Amino acid sequence: MPGNLLSKMRSAFTTFAVLLMAAMLWNGGLPGGADPARLIGAALAQQPSSQAQPAQPARPGQQASTPALTDADYAEWEKLASRTEKALEDNKATDMAFESLRRELSGWRTRFLNAQASNGDQIKMLQTQIDTLGPPPAEGQVESEEIATRRKELQEQLGARQAPVRKAEEAYARAEGLISRIDALIRARQKDKFLQRGPSPVMPATLDVALQDSHSILRTLIKEAGSAAPVKGDEAELRKNLPEMVVLLGLALLLLLRGRTWFKWLVDWVMRQGSGDNRSLVAAMIVSLGQIIVPMIGLVLLVTALITSTMFGSHGEGLLYALPAMGAAFFATRWLGAQIFPRHDNWPTPLVLSSRERLRGRFYASSLGFLFAAAILVQSIAEQFTLQVGTENVFVFPVIVLSALGLAGLARLLMAHNTTEDGRPSAKLLSDDVTDERSLFDRAIQLTGRVCLVFAALAPVAGLLGYMQAAAFMALSPTLTLAIFALVSFLQRLMMGILRLIFGSRRDPNEGLLPVLIDSLFMLASLPFIALVWGARRADLEELWNSIMAGVLIGDMRISPAVLFSLGIAFGIGMLITRVVQTAMRVSILPRTRIDIGGQKAMISGLGYVGVFLSIVAAVSVAGLDLSNLAIVAGALSVGVGFGLQNVVSNFVSGLILLIEQPVAEGDWVEAGGVMGTVRKISVRATTIETFDRNSVIVPNSDLVSNQVTNWTRGNLAGRLILPIGVAYGSDTRKVSAILQEIAEAHPLVIVNPPPMIAFQGFGASSLDFEMRVILRDINFGLATRTELNHQIAERFAAEGVEIPFPQQDLWLRNPEVLRGAPPAGPAVPAVSEPEPGGLIGPVRPDPVPELPGETSEEEDR
């Protein structure tokens, strides 16, 4: 099997081991003898050796931290560039050699980028001095000799300062081009290897060659073991180290055979002690890591004991050094399977499966872990021994087929997530309680299962045809991706449990922005490892990282993460100071003044806007951004704002006017556009008015500025209340006025200066109309005052015998003789009927047209 993908596979599983054992993935092999540190370093031997990180590029105008480049540096660079160009033309060097050249070129490129920022302050100062001298004289014009001499001196100094920068720019462009050519060459080689077809692993000739190589490997190992037997001179040393070897071997076997069982029992005990609550779950999840750490320690001790025995040769030791990576692959995959397909029903897991399906998932995970360890062993054999063409394909093909079967089993479990036995979505997935986010997550899991099933079906076919690189890619890359997702899911759920312990029962940590940020952070951290699994090179990731850290150049201004970080820190400090000042003003200073509540809130809001503006200015200054080059862009944006955002700008300006002039303040009782209520908040775009129905109405600020607004409480809470009153005809009007005057003056909210006024308005249809006009101290209590005055008026009128009338109407009958039972009469002269008991009867006007007995008119029915 080609070693490229297996190398990435070993890198991924080494990542699991290193993360869980608190080591660094990107470090090279650790020095040492036959000790655990050396064994772990051997497992990491396939990783490119780490080098010193290049200095971060300096911002334009900022002096670079690296020393200036000398002529000797450029001579050395010329040698490296020429050597790289010759290697690219010959195209005979290995991928590792090109990767080494690329790393050197990347270091030089960073130095050239920093050199471009050198002399930035001096260049800017000299350019400013030249600008102060004015523009050069036009053709035919002559400037003074003193100015001309000074201009020439400054131009010479400017050219001397710009020469190193231009030289660094030229070298940077050359380094960038060479790196791009190397990347293109390596990608082309990877593509050719991926599509390269070798001998089929099931052909008899290929199997015969593989059998011969197997016999050769066994003979070599046996021969090395026989030749490595201790001679007489070493027997004393062997006997001296024998007790230590026995102790290491016994401890290693104990940890390997019983360590996982102990921690499995410990996890069950923790779950039983806590009855499955959040505290016990977090403790159990942390304790479960011992199922990887303890067996790995035992495996390292085992390899240490075997190497100390000096019974293995160079090839045997090479295979022994692969055991830690193999153990990391097996134990990590098995542990991840137990986390995603747990034995406990209340264990946090992203999948919704039955207990039987989870048992199958643990079996598939353990099997895949064993197959990954076997693949790493095959890679180590291919590195230690010289194999014939086709032998590696025969060794790898069973691993690919079995891995495809395991991947297919996992794919079916993913497709069965949250579904019924017949494959339809479960009632839980279709219920209204399931959010759109959860539904999308469930469908994404099922879609992932279908994609993995396609890869599992194609991998054995590609292997049979001889495309072993493609077959290994389709069988192992999806599985390693699922392993990374499983690790990310475990870390996310562990962090959520820790947050629940921190916050307690105050609030659910799953609600809010913090869980989303944590999940996004873990997913973002997993992207480089996923990229490695799917064929990306470490150089590609480093290039992407350097590009991100270098930022984007806009004119003479470079926007980088460092700039954004300093910008955010400065802005955050400014906003913190603003909030502190606002709090001090609201709590300590403004309450001691005579400013009303609305004015205080307006001042605090205005202070907040000023603080935001000053924070932005300070942040831009601290970050070193020069916004002078954005004047044209700002002008174009202002035009666009003027045309496209007229309403937004109008409301913003209107909000500032409201805060400055304060025609309407928070707490005022206003009436605008048919809406009456209390102003609760004045923001930059709109004002929130709370109606008396406790509804919030959002009114644009421009409506409050340009339209008519009634402010009932602005400046003075006093207001007039008009109360209409009617009494029956025949009442003593002066007595009624005196009673109403007395009632009005006795009310505590009625102002006596000016005194209440009782107006006799006139003679109504059914009553004598009066009006009580009073001024209240606080118009906010107008409705309650109106109610109380009406109660008192009703009580006093009843006590004084003043009648409150009700509307009276006259009833006219067309043919009253029908009501009396008399026959209808002919035309007669209208006459006035006698009053009937219970009401008034007006003049009777018989209809000249006879009607049938018992028939009544429409007015009679009414």
Image (cartoon, grey):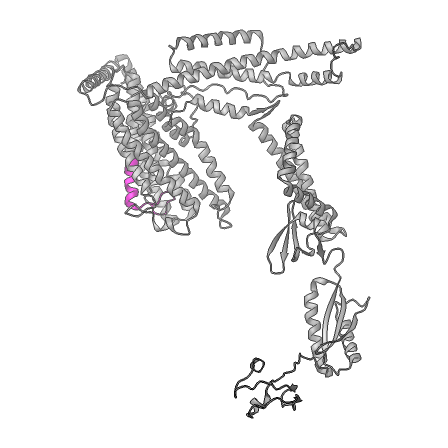
Q: Is residue 498 left or right of residue 55?
A: left
Indicate the quadrant containing the N terminus: top left, top right, bottom left or bottom right: top left
Which residues, given as a range, are shown in magenta? 344-365
State the count of labels.
0
**Relative depth, front residue between 499 and 130:** 130
Task: State the image quarter where residue 445 is shown.
Answer: top left
Give coordinates of residue 693: x percent, y percent: 60, 60
The answer to whether residue 243 is seen in the rendering is: no
Q: Is residue 664 above or below residue 635?
A: below
Give coordinates of residue 511: x percent, y percent: 49, 46
The answer to whether residue 672 is seen in the rendering is: yes
**Relative depth, front residue between 744 and 357:** 744
Q: Residue furthest bottom?
A: 822
Q: Is residue 358 magenta?
A: yes
**Relative depth, front residue between 16 and 70:** 70
Indicate the quadrant containing the C terminus: top left, top right, bottom left or bottom right: bottom right
Name the residue rendered at 54%, 15% in the picture: 172
Q: Is residue 582 above or below residue 181?
A: below
Q: Is residue 719 above or below residue 542?
A: below
Q: Is residue 367 left or right of residue 581?
A: left
Give coordinates of residue 772: x percent, y percent: 75, 71
Q: Is residue 834 magenta?
A: no
Give coordinates of residue 302: x percent, y percent: 31, 26
Q: Is residue 594 left or right of residue 288?
A: right
